[in-house]
Image (tube, grey):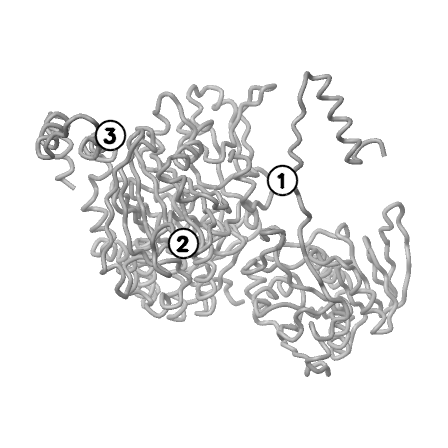
Amino acid sequence: MDIVVCMKQMPDLQQIRIKDRKPILENVPLVWGDLDKNAIEEAALIKEKVGEAKITVVAKGSDKLQQGILEPLAMGADEAVLLTDPAFEGSDSMGTAKVLAKAIEKIGAYDLVILGEGSTDNYSGLVGSALAELLNLPEITYVRELNVENGKVTAVRNMEESFEVVEANLPVVITVAQEINEPRLPKFMAIRKAGAKPRHEWGPADIGLSADEVGENAASVDMLSNLAPEQDRKNIILEGDLDEKIDALVDALIKEGVLGR
Amino acid sequence: MEEEKVEVVIVGAGLAGLSAAYVLAQEGVDTVVVERGDYPGAKNVTGGRIYMYPVARYFPELWEDAPLERHVTRETLTMMAENCSTSITLDSDRFREEPYHSYTILRSKFDRWFGDKVMEAGAFVLPKSRADDVIMEDGRVAGIRMGDEDEIPADVVIAADGVLSLMAEKAGLRQAQQPKHFAVSVKEVIELPSKTIEDRFSLGPNEGTAQLFFGDLTKGMMGGGFLYTNINSISLGLVVGIESLMERDPKIEVHELIEDFKARPEIRNLIAGGEIVEYSAHVIPEGGVNAMPRLYSDGILVVGEAAGFGLNMLLTVRGMEFAVGSGVMAAETIMKARESKDYSAASLSYYEELVKESFIFKDLHSFRNVLSMLENPRLFNFYPQAVCDIFEKLMWIDENPKAKISSTVIREGISKFLNWSTIRDVAGMLRI
Amino acid sequence: MNIESKLGLDVFKIDEEPHIIINQEICRSCEEKFCLYVCPGKLYSINRETGDMDVECSGCLECGTCRIACVHGALDWNYARGGFGVQFRFG
């Protein structure tokens, strides 16, 4: 069985400082999204169960990927395709899906394509569906339990208020939810050996695209601004005795629309 | 089956560990650096300045494009009394000549960069991994353990895990640490535009200032304050002896000291309008040669602050130079031991020889009595006040006739300084 | 600025597992309780209900002052686990 896992490197959100309502992204360390780790973990679990399987990670990110990719390789991936060309930068969800589709088509063999249901930075949740469409494959989203047997997958989807069990024939695109598994912490020797696993760096030309068909140039969505919510304090000081203060507080909260809607 | 082992495992990606790794990697030694932070530097704190002359000879190519902050062109020492202070400033053209004498530094930025250089040189830096114990095999250290399930067997371990050095402790090289040998430092990084810093401190582009303070700010306790200008921030903090903090009566909370320090007019205007972007704390070794652990044993070497290499001389505070130097010496020792594949204590004792012949041990030894001088509370209350008083008398003009300068100095000098405690203090200082 | 707000400026990766464990028996027998004021993060406090010493590990700067100052040995002290605890951006 051939499994492709798509992963994206992103800034460590906890490390981002906000200045003048704008995020400072310069020099912020890069990490894998939490759900991306669930995706590679699920692939590794399937491989352990079915025995014969090859896991290829397709990862998008900066030149730091050469280092970062060791983690999924140590977790169980056999091979990695790195999309580090600066031309890929600034793409929107559709653009990312297009690049992933081309890369996966070039890989050729894929029974299962696994992604996180969304990335922790943008959380558009669109890439999986767009990718399924481009590859002309069925897609199962929000998967919290996955079983692969006899050329079929059975998946439990988290519908928030209910669980839905669905079945599909391979090949299929799966997007996973966080509760599907607990990603493993790779051991040192596994990380060390991961360095010897095959890694390919593909630019736009390698997947049959020109530079203006990818990245910011090809994005159909423009990000106009990215600002933290304003947190101006009202600095209202309530006067009077306790009862008066409480009344004034309730009035103020009603006025602000916090109470009594 | 191929043995799963590395040649050298270094615990801690600070200056000592990374320096050792950088040298070893360049020599083609299979080296792994284990770092508990998310990246090298994530757990590392300094007051703020590295002296270049002791370290420039090691890997000169590296320093050339290192992300250091400002080269220091002006040094100030301030004695603070309760309501006044006296400063001495040295501004010298020598400080403006290359190679520069010292630079201010932010370690999270610098060490992260250094970690990348070490990786490029061929060593492996493993972040987000805490070393928990040493592997003991036939009485010798044979690697490290991380948690219950992971380990890195190695020919030799370098404990570069900082001032507390749990590794040296686990390997039986040191005893529990005593409060009198350590100080705690708290620091704030305060962001200000580069231009504001240059205007406020009267600095040229890329020029920096280093200011040390002692006296009332530590409320009679052993310690002092520091201020370093970075490119677009100020590192401001203070250091206080842990034992003096424990013994002080009435008690004082260490985090309050920095608030009082910042509220002083001497400081307040320098940092006005700045935004605090980080608060950190760090323990500093002050025990010198008297508190050094054993530096080596079978299969293990101890470097940097883990080995107690730090020196507070009031006028200068040092540690990073010792870290780089000892890291390189540990690497040289391993290169030599590697020729005969002998990592026994006898073979690794070469490291102690190197340290003893170097500036590290010589400086620590020369200044071994500084600590006892610093323990003198008169240094932190009497002297700053006395010096301020004399200056104030000289400077003060009012309706009364002014006394002659010479007679003021002589009269005040005699009344304040000509007594047995002062003579004893001076005698003590002359021993340094 | 108070100490809580100051700690709020730092990046902390919070671990559910505490990395400092207090031996309450030893702690109770200690008169000085140095930990209450030597900690730069002011993370030690006496629990009003139980009388036990509490430590708020999630704001720990990992300096080790408490480890050195607790001369009675009530602390089973370790650094935060790999990938957890304070992550300095400036240092």
Report x, y in % for residue C85. 55, 45
Q: In which quarter of the image is residue B429?
A: top left
Res. B385 mark: 3
Crowd band around label 1 with a 10 angstrom C-alpha radius: few (<14), some (14–19), many (20+): few
Q: Name the residue under label 1.
A: C16
Which callout, 2 or 3, points to the residue nearer the camera?
3
Report x, y in % for residue A98. 77, 73
Left or right: residue A143 compared with residue A244: right
Above or below, B388 relative to A127: above
Crowd band around label 2 with a 10 angstrom C-alpha radius: few (<14), some (14–19), many (20+): many
Q: Which amino acid does label 2 sit on?
A: Asn
Left or right: residue A259 compared with residue B386: right
**Residue lying furthest front:** B399
In three-dimensional space, the C-alpha distance between marks 2 and 3, rounded to whole angstroms, equals 31 Å
- Whether labels 2 and 3 belong to a single chain: the reply is yes
Above or below, B426 relative to B351: above
Q: Mark 2 points at which residue?
A: B230
Q: Which residue is drawn at 66% across and 43% down?
A: A231
Report x, y in % for residue B8. 42, 61
In three-dimensional space, the C-alpha distance between marks 3 and 1, rounded to whole angstroms, equals 49 Å
- Kindly state the secondary structure of the residue where label 1 is placed: loop
Q: Which amino acid does label 1 sit on?
A: Glu
Res. B191 mark: none
